[in-house]
Image (tube, rainbow, N blue to C red):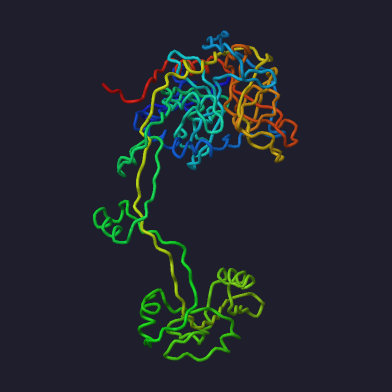
């Protein structure tokens, strides 16, 4: 049993100058750390709105998350043995399947397993594997600590955390369970000690959206609505658009949509305009009727062939310096701009000259460009359409589908157990092996079976000194999945005695050949028991 030692502080600093090197381990009560995920219905609404909109698009777009938990080759050391910190203990599972219709190589997949979804530190939707586990209020999920706490950003818990048992291709047959409170070991939450890389999360009762009739609503009600909703655009006249903007303002539902602009060459206008009119307005009448005059860059040879500029501003004649800045002028530039323009010249994007001035030793000391332009008249047109946005919702709304454990059951819990025993590990592997080979899709759960290692796994890079290993080729996405001892294939239940933490390449051949889990000792049991006694319940507002 490993303990991280922390110094004891009082208001005036260390306990005493003579005890400056003295440390003390955290008390048993201090082993448990907890953090609120979604504190109230308003928070739950935001979470559900994110995951459910556009027919659960975010669930389907989420990718596997393991924060680079892959240890390779010589970084993995197997040594010593495990020492329990107390007597072995178990908590019995709940739920039992009467039928076993789903099989994978004669192994009945547990209904308790699924995916936890969340936003990582960059706001990207991600997933890990997890399982429902027995608790007093039948409301608890077991997963890896790094699937709850954001190690990458070192910024507390991951956002918008939900558990979807029996997840399959964007479907949530047993509902979505929003996380309420996350429990983990103090050393993991505060020091990222991967020997404590486990977490137990209480969840509110499951929620589902029930379809109802389609109702048109105003914009404010649309924004507040959580559930199936969409916007339709109805085409209107310009007068209706102007009347609508006058009534609702520029941010209202009345919109002017401008399509892709088409630019074509045209003959110069018949009317003659002075230099001041064109130059001062940055183009003829700021594009009156869509027509404007441009300075178009050409090669020096083309420029030399062009006619001299006149007051008529004719197509193809040389541009006037008053309109085209630095026309034919040698302009000093930076080396960075010179390098960039050199690439543009190679691709035909820059047509001018580039020059480099060197000192007597051949060192570059100054850089210049020279460009040339001719006049071109063009007309820009773009299709315009006026619409009014209409807002629709399906008014069925949310319904409470009950407690997690009542719906899918809950695995038991075991701690201080001997190693070298058989376990069955489940998860949703997805990521490629280090060599690029990608045998998994992440769509359906997979499993591994075997005896756990009787030697400690040590990986210094992840602060691991005493994890348990199992031969297994599952990859990222399976992290957080349960290690079940005494798994009953008929009941689909066993005892959670670990969760997948690291993926190991023990022979350094760029293929995952083992996975590891924290050893579940009495301290893990303390975290579990604190979580298992925490209530959550229904989060929907009650009506009379």
Query: Residue 202's spot in the image, x, y percent?
Result: 44, 22
Query: In front here: 504 or 463?
Result: 504
Q: Is residue 16 visible?
A: no
Image point 46% across, 31% down: which residue? 161
| Image height of 104 relative to 506, above or below | above
Q: Is residue 281 visible?
A: yes
Residue closest to the far left:
247
| Image height of 527 relative to 161, above or below | above
Query: Residue 103's spot in the image, x, y percent?
Result: 65, 20
| Image height of 94 relative to 397, above or below | above
Total numbered labels placed on residues in the image: 0
| Image height of 47 relative to 413, above or below | below
Query: Residue 390's spot in the image, x, y percent?
Result: 35, 47
Q: Is residue 441 left or right of residue 327?
A: right
Quadrant assignment for the C terminus = top left
Query: In front here: 191 or 176?
Result: 176
Query: In front here: 18 or 479?
Result: 479
Q: Answer with the quarter of the image where residue 274 lies.
A: bottom left
Query: Residue 223's spot in the image, x, y percent?
Result: 34, 41
Quadrant assignment for the N terminus = top right
């Amino acid at each position: 049993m490993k303990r991280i030692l922390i110094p004891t502080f009082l208001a005036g600093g260390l306990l005493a100058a003579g005890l400056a090197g003295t440390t003390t381990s955290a008390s048993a009560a201090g082993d448990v750390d907890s953090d609120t995920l979604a504190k109230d219905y308003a928070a739950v609404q935001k979470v559900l709105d994110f995951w459910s909109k556009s027919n659960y698009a975010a669930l389907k777009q989420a990718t596997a998350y393991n924060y680079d938990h892959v240890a390779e080759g010589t970084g993995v050391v197997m040594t010593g043995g495990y020492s329990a910190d107390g007597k072995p203990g178990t908590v019995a599972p709940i739920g039992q399947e009467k039928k076993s219709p789903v099989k994978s190589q004669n192994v009945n997949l547990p209904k308790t397993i699924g995916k936890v979804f969340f936003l990582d530190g960059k706001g990207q939707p991600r997933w890990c594997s997890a399982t429902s586990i027995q608790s007093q209020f039948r409301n608890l999920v077991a997963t890896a600590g790094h699937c709850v706490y954001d190690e990458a950003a070192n910024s507390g818990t991951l956002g918008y955390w939900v558990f979807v048992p029996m997840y399959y291709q964007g479907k949530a047959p047993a509902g979505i369970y929003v996380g309420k409170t996350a429990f983990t070991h103090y050393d993991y939450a505060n020091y990222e000690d991967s020997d404590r890389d486990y977490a137990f999360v209480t969840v509110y009762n499951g929620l589902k959206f029930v379809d109802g009739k389609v109702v048109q609503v105003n914009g404010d009600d649309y924004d507040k609505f959580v559930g199936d909703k969409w916007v339709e655009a109805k085409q209107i006249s310009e007068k209706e658009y102007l009347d609508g903007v006058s009534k609702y303002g520029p941010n209202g539902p009345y919109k002017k949509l401008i399509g892709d602009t088409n630019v074509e060459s045209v003959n110069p206008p018949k009317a003659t305009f002075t230099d001041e009119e064109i130059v001062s307005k940055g183009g003829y009448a700021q594009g009156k009727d869509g027509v404007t005059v441009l300075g178009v860059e050409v090669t020096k040879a083309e420029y030399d062939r062009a006619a001299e500029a006149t007051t008529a501003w004719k197509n193809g004649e040389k541009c006037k310096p008053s309109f085209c800045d630095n026309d034919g002028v040698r302009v000093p530039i930076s080396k960075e701009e010179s390098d960039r323009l050199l690439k543009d010249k190679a691709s035909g994007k820059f047509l001018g000259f580039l020059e480099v001035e060197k000192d007597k030793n051949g060192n570059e000391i100054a850089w210049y460009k020279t460009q040339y332009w001719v006049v071109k008249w063009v007309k820009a047109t773009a299709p315009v359409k006026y619409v009014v946005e209409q807002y629709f919702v399906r008014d069925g709304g949310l319904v409470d589908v009950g407690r997690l454990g009542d719906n899918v059951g809950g695995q038991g819990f075991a701690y201080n157990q001997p190693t070298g025993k058989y376990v069955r590990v489940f998860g949703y592997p997805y990521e490629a092996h280090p060599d690029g080979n990608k045998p998994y899709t992440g769509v359906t759960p997979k499993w591994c079976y075997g005896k756990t290692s009787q030697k400690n796994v040590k990986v210094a890079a992840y602060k691991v000194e005493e994890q348990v290993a199992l031969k297994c080729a599952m990859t990222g996405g399976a992290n957080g999945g349960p290690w079940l001892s005494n798994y009953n294939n008929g009941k689909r239940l066993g005892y959670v005695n670990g969760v997948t933490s690291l993926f190991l390449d023990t022979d350094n051949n760029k293929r995952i050949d083992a996975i590891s889990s924290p050893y579940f000792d009495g301290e893990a049991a303390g975290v579990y028991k604190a979580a298992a006694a925490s209530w959550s319940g229904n989060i929907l507002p009650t009506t009379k």
